[in-house]
Image (cartoon, helix red, strand yellow):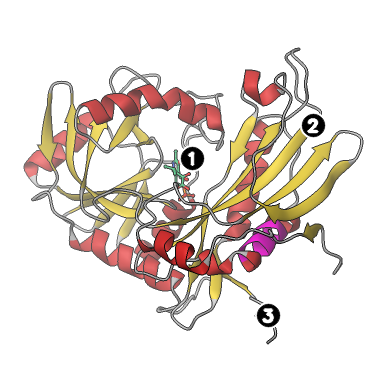
Amino acid sequence: MSEKSFVITPTEHPVSDADRARLLEHPGFGAVFSDHMATLKWTSDKGWHDGLVGPRRPFQIDPAAAVLHYGQEIFEGMKAYQTQNGGVVLFRPEANAKRFGRSAERLAMPVLPTELFIEAIEELVRLDHEWIPTSEGASLYLRPFLFATEAFLGVRPSREFTFCVLASPVGPYFSGGQKPITVWVSKDYIRAASGGTGAAKCGGNYAAGLLAQAQAYDHGCDQVVFLDAVERRWIEELGGMNVFFVTKDGKLMTPPLSGTILEGITRDSILKLAAEQGLTVQETPYSYEQWKLDAASGVLTEAFACGTAAVIVPIGVVRDAAGEFTIGNGAAGPVTETLYHRLVNIQRGVEADTHEWLHKIEILQPVG
Ligand code: PLP
Ligand code: COI
């Protein structure tokens, strides 16, 4: 089917070229937005309808909208990159679309077909391609999300939803760029339990993690590490990233997909790249106690966090209420650095895309 699902209505008041250039210089993370957004509605009687890519503007929703009371909301995070030859690509968008579908099922929401998910993103990126920053480490972060709009206070799945995609030019997630971060191991709070929503990318997971994240900041840390809900012993993931461990004998370990952690697309890509590099890759439970012992004995040489926003960032120091320890000499290690460069080089079209992870977007240049 070649018919478009989205009506395109460009803004009559775009940000000027000069202002955009200034905003793209140091965008930070998540604070600058492009001119447009994509929206699509769903109702139980009409299904998906009213696709639009138009000016970015506030929503009007009823104060009784279910999302405001019961938090029925899911989201995704992905990036559009400018490749070294000037093309524009997405990284594994089908994987984001599939995960969005799994999150929707878990939150009793309608599943958006993969083609519609990708079409919305493509149309938005086409219209706002001038917002893709070209400096090193920068990209256009895309935030698709779906939320319940039915005005009804009874507790049941909503019958009306709005899907939206925002585009935000971003630099590195952490203020220190790809420099090693310090993480805070939360002993007070957990993120997810078996049977809960840990594997879904829903707003509620992040709301529930904010107090632990605030404690991390209070202790001078960048991110919080969550332990499992049952034994409070096994490392799960960070508030917004998956975690990997590297041993001196060439083993790369990450916690298994137990249903309580997010199935990171960066995590999956790293597992594949590392195996190709000859590392012994293990998806295995790893305890906080063992992490400490292995760091002290030198068995563990590196640890890093990974995700779309963070890419790959070394963990330098691990802290909890009782003390702290350093990983290796606290600096970025060679395995972390090699994986970072390989991933970024594939995303930028510098290294061959042997896994067919890149999804090219044709940008139609205006005539004249
Ligand atoms: N874990 C959590 C809780 C996240 O929020 C993210 C970020 O999306 C990740 C892991 C990494 O997932 P991905 O690599 O797909 O961005
Ligand atoms: C992402 O990496 O896309 C996320 O959603 C994580 C968040 C910390 C921004």
123 in the magenta segment: yes
Q: Residues under labels 1 and 3: Cα distance?
A: 40 Å
Residue at the limit of the structure toward the top, as seen here: 154
Q: Which residue, given by chain and number where applicable, does mark 2 sit on?
A: 160
> Of helix, strand and loop, which mostly describes the magenta segment?
helix
Q: Is residue 354 left or right of residue 172?
A: right
Front one among 305 and 174: 174
Residue 202 tag number: none
Q: Which residue, given by chain and number where applicable, does mark 3 sit on?
A: 366
Q: Nearer the viewer, mark 1 or mark 2?
A: 2
Q: Secondary structure at mark 3?
A: loop
Q: Secondary structure at mark 1?
A: loop
- The type of residue carrying mark 2 is Glu
Residue 262 tag number: 1
- Who's the residue at 44% across and 47% down the image? 31
Is the CB atom of the residue marked by disc 1 within 8 angstroms of ligand 1's nearest atom?
yes
Front one among 143 and 21: 21
Question: Percent from the top left, x then y, of residue 255?
Answer: 37, 41
Q: Is residue 37 left or right of residue 180?
A: right
Q: Is residue 67 left or right of residue 352?
A: right
Q: Is residue 89 above or below residue 368?
A: above
Residue at the limit of the structure toward the right, as seen here: 45
Q: Residues under labels 3 and 2: Cα distance?
A: 37 Å
Q: Secondary structure at mark 2?
A: strand
